[in-house]
Amino acid sequence: MLATPGSLPPPAQDERWAYETKQDGQRVIVYLPGDGSVLLRARSGEDITAAYPELHPLGESLGAAPAVLDGEVLALDERGRSDFQLLQSRMGLAHAPARAAHRAARVPVHLVLFDVPFLGESLVRLPYLRRRARLRELGLSGPHWSTPGAVTGHGAEALAATREHGLEGLVCKRLDSVYEPGVRSRAWVKIRNTRAEDVIVGGWLPGKGRLTGLPGAVLVGQRAGGRLRYVGGVGTGWSEAERTELAALLRAAASDRCPFDPVPRVTGAHWVLPRLVGEVGYSTRTRSGMLRQPSWLRLRPDLAPEDSSADLPDEPG
């Protein structure tokens, strides 16, 4: 069951919803046949069990009771917050168990569980509130897995808390909602916290298909330590008219020299003079300062390039 992007429920309906922290990890369905084994499947349906050997003991946690659990695999940073960049070093190793075991010793993962669609029998027709109660009763808490709580009501306060603590966002779940496998349901609503910062455009990548002749993405940076540091490519957020306007501005600013220091490894880039300032929204930054999930918000003709700066790590990745 997948969540639909949206906003908080109306205040009058607040008490009809539960609120969970939105995690920045890999969604998994956990199959526990009751024989001590465990099977992990990604959203694609791929068997990823071998990628996470530290989760294998979960197979013995419920004894002979067969169950299907829904959750998210996380890699936690030194502050205990999910870090998708760390997790990427663990993903894709389902067919390399030796490498997976070696990585597990260096970057252990943690599985957070938030639903139980099956427990000896199908629970998909039970309301969320009753499924959550059944999940809590299982007492699933171990060295590499846990069952975080959910808050009923107080959605605005819960969302504010995620922003205050730098978390990805919030998932709102209607208390009477059934579990809909494979459905992106309006009974689950996800709200992603986005940040916004000013950036300097230093290049662009040509679009393809219907975007041929227009920028498919712009390459942006921010000033730090006296130089323009590359912080990522932005390929979404424009209307057709805005993209056409931007194309004209980029052509007028064309340059043979890359303005970023160091020069990013971007194939097919067209460089421009670093004089266009824009505002972008993004979810978070990687450890090297790159913007995750950036989206274009607007041009900032009222700002000079010197106004865009950031506190970036000393060593870019």
Image (spheres, grey):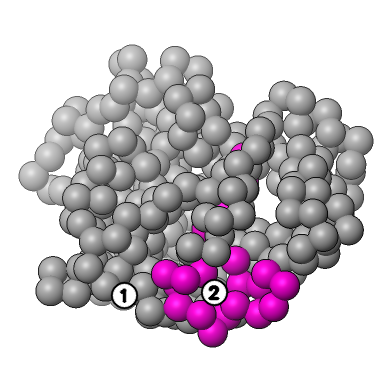
* Residue that extends furthest to the left in the rendered view of this protein: 302
The range drawn in magenta is: 110-131
Camera sees residue 57: yes
Q: Nearer the viewer, residue 71 or 304?
A: 71
Q: Position of residue 98 (x, y in %)?
A: 91, 36
Disc 1, SS? helix
- Residue lying at the far bottom of the rendered structure: 125
The picture quadrant where one finds residue 246 is bottom left
Q: Residue at x 80, y 48 (%)?
A: 60
Q: Amino acid at mark 2?
A: Met
Lateral position of residue 101 relative to residue 116, left or right: right
**Callout 1, which amino acid?**
Glu
Pick the front one: 279 or 145: 145
Q: Crowding at label 1, few (<14), some or many (≥20) Cα neighbours within 10 Å?
A: few
Q: Secondary structure at mark 2?
A: loop
Residue 227, x across and y down, in percent: 35, 21
The percent position of residue 257, horizontal first and vertical second, equals 44, 34
| Residue at 38% over, 79% down | 176
Q: What residue is drawn where x is 38% and y is 69%?
A: 173
Gap in angstroms between the C-alphas marked 2 and 1: 33 Å
User: Quarter holding the C terminus?
Assistant: top right
Residue that label 2 marks: 1
- Name above or below for residue 185 compared with residue 290: below
User: Which residue has dot 1 on it?
Assistant: 240
Q: Residue 181: name its quadrant.
A: bottom right
- 10 Å crowding of disc 2: few (<14), some (14-19), many (20+): some
